[in-house]
C-alpha cells in the first residue's frame, strides 16, 4: 500500500520478531522497532549515552538493554531505567495499517 502522506512507513509486521528488534533507516533517522506482545514500539536507534545501537540490544520486559554499556530504557516512554543511561530517548507511536508499521514522522511522543 502507499504510505499515507502524513505517515512514514518503517517496516512490515512480519519483519519483526519479539526476540529481535529491527533497525530501520527512514527519512534520515535510524529507528529501532520493537514487538512487545501484540504491541509495537518505535524508538530512536542511537542510545543517548553513547554509540550503542538499541536495535542490537534485547528486551527485558518493556525495557531495551543497550548492548554497549547495558543501560536500559523503557521502550514505551523512552525514559532511562538503568544506569549509565540518564537522558531519555525519543519514541514514536507505532501506527499499524494493513500489516505495515508507520510513525508520524518528526512527531515523537510528548513532543
Ligand atoms: S552507549 Fe548505551 S549504555 Fe552506553
Image (cartoon, rainbow, N blue to C red):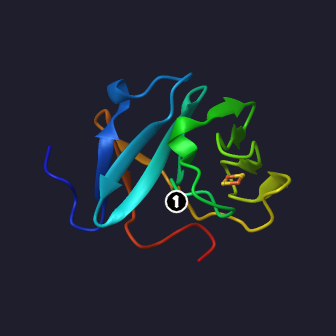
Q: Position of residue 52 (x, y in %)?
A: 59, 51
For this orientation, the residue located farthest to the left is 2
- Identify the residue at horizontal 83%, vertical 51% (top origin): 81
Q: Position of residue 85 (x, y in %)?
A: 78, 58
Quarter assignment of residue 67: top right
Q: Nearer the viewer, residue 36 or 25?
A: 25
* Numbered disc total: 1
Q: Position of residue 91 (x, y in %)?
A: 57, 60
Q: Nearer the viewer, residue 93 or 90?
A: 90
- Identify the residue at horizontal 29%, vertical 58% (top origin): 26
Q: Nearer the viewer, residue 59 or 35?
A: 59
Answer with left or right where residue 91 lies relative to residue 73.
Answer: left
| Quadrant in the picture for the C terminus | bottom right
Would you call the spot at circle 1 few (<14 residues within 10 Å), some (14-19), or many (20 or more)? Answer: many
Q: Circle 1 sits in a helix, a strand or a loop, which is it? A: strand
Answer with left or right where residue 23 lies relative to residue 65.
Answer: left
- Identify the residue at horizontal 54%, vertical 57% (top origin): 46
Answer with left or right where residue 17 lies relative to residue 9.
Answer: right
- Identify the residue at horizontal 31%, vertical 67% (top origin): 28
Q: Position of residue 38 (x, y in %)?
A: 56, 28
| Quadrant in the picture for the N terminus | top left
Answer with left or right where residue 99 lies relative to residue 47.
Answer: left
Residue at image mark 1: 92
Depicted 23 relative to depicted 107: above or below? above
Depicted 50 relative to depicted 72: above or below? below
Q: Tell whether circle 1 marks a residue whose Cβ is less than 8 angstroms from ligand 1.
A: no
Quarter assignment of residue 41: top right
Amino acid at each position: 500500500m502507499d504510505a499515507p502522506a502524513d505517515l512514514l512507513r518503517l517496516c512490515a509486521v512480519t519483519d519483526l520478531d519479539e526476540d529481535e528488534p529491527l533497525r530501520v533507516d527512514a527519512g534520515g533517522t535510524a529507528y529501532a522497532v520493537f514487538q512487545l506482545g501484540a504491541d509495537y514500539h518505535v524508538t530512536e536507534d542511537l542510545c543517548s549515552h553513547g554509540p550503542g545501537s538499541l536495535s542490537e540490544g534485547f528486551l527485558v520486559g518493556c525495557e531495551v538493554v543497550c548492548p554497549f554499556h547495558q543501560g536500559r530504557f523503557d521502550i514505551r516512554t523512552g525514559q532511562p531505567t538503568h544506569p549509565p543511561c540518564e537522558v531519555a530517548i525519543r519514541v514514536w507511536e507505532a501506527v499499524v495499517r494493513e500489516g505495515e508499521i508507520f510513525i508520524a514522522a518528526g512527531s515523537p511522543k510528548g513532543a
